[in-house]
Image (tube, helix red, strand yellow):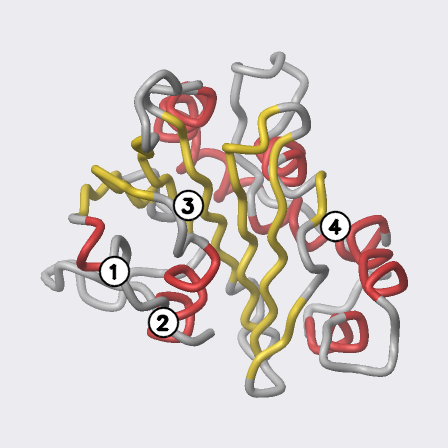
Amino acid sequence: MHRLSSIFLIIVMSAAAANAQGHASTTCPKDLSWMLDYAAPNKKSNDDNEKLLNLPCFKDAIRKAFPAKQSMLGNDFPLSKAILNYVAVYGEGPQSFDNRYITIQGCYPHQCPSVGMIWIDTKRPGALIFAGSDEINPLKSPEDFHLWMVTTLPDLNQRQPLDLPEPFIRSLAAVFATEHFVSATVVHRDGRMENLMPETLHLNTSTPVAK
């Protein structure tokens, strides 16, 4: 409980410096379209598709997209590894949409009320968003959640109240359709935090939005 809130408070303090540093790679392609080979619908099994999460170039893409530091899980445990932990217990395996977008969903080991989703735009280098639910009161029924999101996308217009791609919003509403959110926060690439109403993200609706 509140694991994500502690993680993202650290992100806000270190995001700008981390994005300035970055990491260089000479072996992994910037074009992420190769990941579509590991995302359903395809001719591979879920087990084969889930091998994506253990491939060095996938981990490299996550590391470069989310280089910020956090301390909740130890000072030497970067945000990228924390994000991978939030999908460590696999859901339905990587899924692709419109032959472009990939969603990877799962939950945190031994804390499966805490659901995570990685959203990837394979045609836009470095365009990844992580979303994770943080259980507020596990004794309450039904449970209330806070939604945390961290995006690698540049702000198109800071005057707009919401700067998240519509395909991401659709996937978000589908993956988190069964959870009740009372609040939501997006952490932007520069560390700026923006609070949103869950309904703005098509959450808490009686009819799930198609992915």
- Quarter-wise, where is residue 182 in the image? top left
Query: At 76% from the left edge and 56% from the top edge, which residue is drawn?
Result: 58
Residue 116 image point, x, y percent: 54, 44
Residue 82 image point, x, y percent: 61, 31
Seen in the picture, residue 90 relative to 102 is either above or below; the reply is above
Question: Which part of the image, by quadrant, shows the N terminus?
Answer: top left
Q: Disc 2 marks which residue?
A: 209
The amino acid type of the residue labelled 4 equals: Asp
Number of the label disc, if any, that sits on residue 205: 1
**From mark 2 to mark 4, how far is it between C-alphas?**
31 Å
- Disc 1 to disc 4: CB gap under 8 Å: no
Residue 4 image point, x, y percent: 44, 27
Label 4: how many Cα within 10 Å (few below 14, some 14–19, many 20+): some
Label 1: how many Cα within 10 Å (few below 14, some 14–19, many 20+): some
Q: Disc 4 marks which residue?
A: 60
Number of the label disc, if any, that sits on residue 150: 3
